């Protein structure tokens, strides 16, 4: 029996041993989910809705416990971890309204009537990365269950604990056996098996672009549905007419939140040349004022990186450039890298082009609106971005010009469970969240009935 020892990234101490499923165990769980599907899809819409609301209520009663687990397992700050557990509850509540609203259409035809149905796919798999273990589980699981699918989940090797607990809470809430199954294990074993197993009808994957491409290639064999939520190298575009203090105050949290291990991290800051020096001064003030503390400390705004390996990868990027300034970081144990600001020398540097996935941001000036859009788009990614300006027209032009799925104006925030989320270009395929997410876990059937 193979086990994985979960490590607390803030203390480097072991937390718990978790069994890693084999291919044979994965097959047995998938078959059990398949066996549970006919009864689950037949649960009347109102009853399925009530079960999801009960699941949400049980999660709500355990928000503090889940947050406490995530602080220990992933090094997330207490504030983030409680938000994340609450996000699972909110997603379940939001999509609990979907079973009764899974509308088809009636389309005018000659000689009869034509109606469409949204039918569940069967067993769907959700593969979760380590950076946001709870929200990404919720974003896949909630709409998939609401649409009548049975769900198998593979949490990331490094961060399985909250998913395991949420699986137990689902049973406590009364979800039938086999409807939601959490299967901890390796990506190369459990994750791969989701791709190759014929009874798994869709894979909702969030993770690196490299693994995402491999999954898409694998799914092609069975023309298996897949959605991909992948990497990013998002731009934060600051115009000279913006409230510079507000823009500089917000920028650190747009990239250093979750220690930069965020697919939406605005890890490139583009500043209009005439405001460049003033913005940098304000940014330095904001970065140096960040509270980088033990994540269990309720005042902490940034915790450690997830692992020694991730810290070394991030440090590798930092070592090859000149650092302009950094924020604080604790001494002692834990995989810490301080919030780090680099003034890029060219758009060809690795620090400007590659997803660092750590608390490092690169800054460059731009000359005008067209230049800003071109620089923002000069990347294979297209996940998110921010635009700071006092001119609404300019904000809209730039928002329409940037090739990315999620943009925010004079704000960092882009991800809400009730608005669609996903990437352009190599940041992904398909959309999650928002009102249409349940449809992405269905096939649309068309039926014509002759008069
Ligand atoms: P990763 O691709 O290494 O792993 C993600 C998940 O895939 C893990 O559960 C892993 O075990 C599994 N996996 C690995 N190899 C597999 C295989 N061959 N077949 C099936 N599954 C496999 O990514 P990571 O390092 O855990 O996460 C970081 C990445 O995720 C970053 O690139 C980040 O940008 C991205 N991400 C994207 C979003 C988004 O919504 N777009 C959100 C969060 C993270």
Image (cartoon, grey):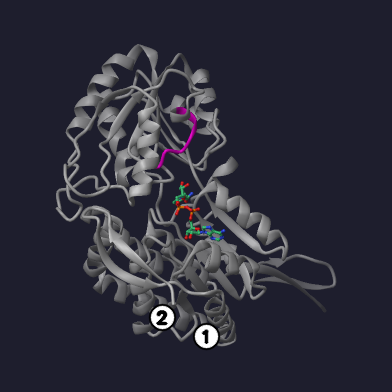
Instruction: Give the side of residue 419 with respect to residue 308, left or right.
Output: right
Seen from this angle, which residue lies furthest right?
Answer: 111
Measure the C-alpha gap from mark 1 to mark 2. Answer: 10 Å
Q: Which residue is painted at 54% across and 81% down in the image?
A: 33
Q: Which quarter of the figure is the C terminus placed in?
A: bottom right
Please name the residue that numbered disc 2 is placed on. 51
Q: Quick one: 231 or 145, which is closer to the camera?
A: 231
The image quarter in which residue 95 lies: bottom left
Residue 42 picture location, percent across and down: 57, 85
Q: Which residue is painted at 57% across and 82% down in the image?
A: 37
Q: Main secondary structure of the magenta part?
A: loop
Seen from this angle, which residue lies furthest top?
Answer: 274
Residue 98 is at least partly visible in this image? no
Nearer-N-terminus badge (1/2): 1
Q: Quick one: 34 or 107, which is closer to the camera?
A: 34
Q: Which residue is painted at 53% across and 69% down in the image?
A: 190
Please name the residue that numbered disc 1 is placed on. 43
The image quarter in which residue 8 lies: bottom left
Query: Magenta residues?
Result: 352-357
Q: Secondary structure at mark 2?
A: helix
Instruction: Give the side of residue 102 with respect to residue 283, left or right.
Output: right
Circle 2 Cα neighbour tier, 10 Å, few/some/many (<14 / 14–19 / ≥20): many
Residue 79 picture location, percent across and down: 22, 54
């Amino acid at each position: 029996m193979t086990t994985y020892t979960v490590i607390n990234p803030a203390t480097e101490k072991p937390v718990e041993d978790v069994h890693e499923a084999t291919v044979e165990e994965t097959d047995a769980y998938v078959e059990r989910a398949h066996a549970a599907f006919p009864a689950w899809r037949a649960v009347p819409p109102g009853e399925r809705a009530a079960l999801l609301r009960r699941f949400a209520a049980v999660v709500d009663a355990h928000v503090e416990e889940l947050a406490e687990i995530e602080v220990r397992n992933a090094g997330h700050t207490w504030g983030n971890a409680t938000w994340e557990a609450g996000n699972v509850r909110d997603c379940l509540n939001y999509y609990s309204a979907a079973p009764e609203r899974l509308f088809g259409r009636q389309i005018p035809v000659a000689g009869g009537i034509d109606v469409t149905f949204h039918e569940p796919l069967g067993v769907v798999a959700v593969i979760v990365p380590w950076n946001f273990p709870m929200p990404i589980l919720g974003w896949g699981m909630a709409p998939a269950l609401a649409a009548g699918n049975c769900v198998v989940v593979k949490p990331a090797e490094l961060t399985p604990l909250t998913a395991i607990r949420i699986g137990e809470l689902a049973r406590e809430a009364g979800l039938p056996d086999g409807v939601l199954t959490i299967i901890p294990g390796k990506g190369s074993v459990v994750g791969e098996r989701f791709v190759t197993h014929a009874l798994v009808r869709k894979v909702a994957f969030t993770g690196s672009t490299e693994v995402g491409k491999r999954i898409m290639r694998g799914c092609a064999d069975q023309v298996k549905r897949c959605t991909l939520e992948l990497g990013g190298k998002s731009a934060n575009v600051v115009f000279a007419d913006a409230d510079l203090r507000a823009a500089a105050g917000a920028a650190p949290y747009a990239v250093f939140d979750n220690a930069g291990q965020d697919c939406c991290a605005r890890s490139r800051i583009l500043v209009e040349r005439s405001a460049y020096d003033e913005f940098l001064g304000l940014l330095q003030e904001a970065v140096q004022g960040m509270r980088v503390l033990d994540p269990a400390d309720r005042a902490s705004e940034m915790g450690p990186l997830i692992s020694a390996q991730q810290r070394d990868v991030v440090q590798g990027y930092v070592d090859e450039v000149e650092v302009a300034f950094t924020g604080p970081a604790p001494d002692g144990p834990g995989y810490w890298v301080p919030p780090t600001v680099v003034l890029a020398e060219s758009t060809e540097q690795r620090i400007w082009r590659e997803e660092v996935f750590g608390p490092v941001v690169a800054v460059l000036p731009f000359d005008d609106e067209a230049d800003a859009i071109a620089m923002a788009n000069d990347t294979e990614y297209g996940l998110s971005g921010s635009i700071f300006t006092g001119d609404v027209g300019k904000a809209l032009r730039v928002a329409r010009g940037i090739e990315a799925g999620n943009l925010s104006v004079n704000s960092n925030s882009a991800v809400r469970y009730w608005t669609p989320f996903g990437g352009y270009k190599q940041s992904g395929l398909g959309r999650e969240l928002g009102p249409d997410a349940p449809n992405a876990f269905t096939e649309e059937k068309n039926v014509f009935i002759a008069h």
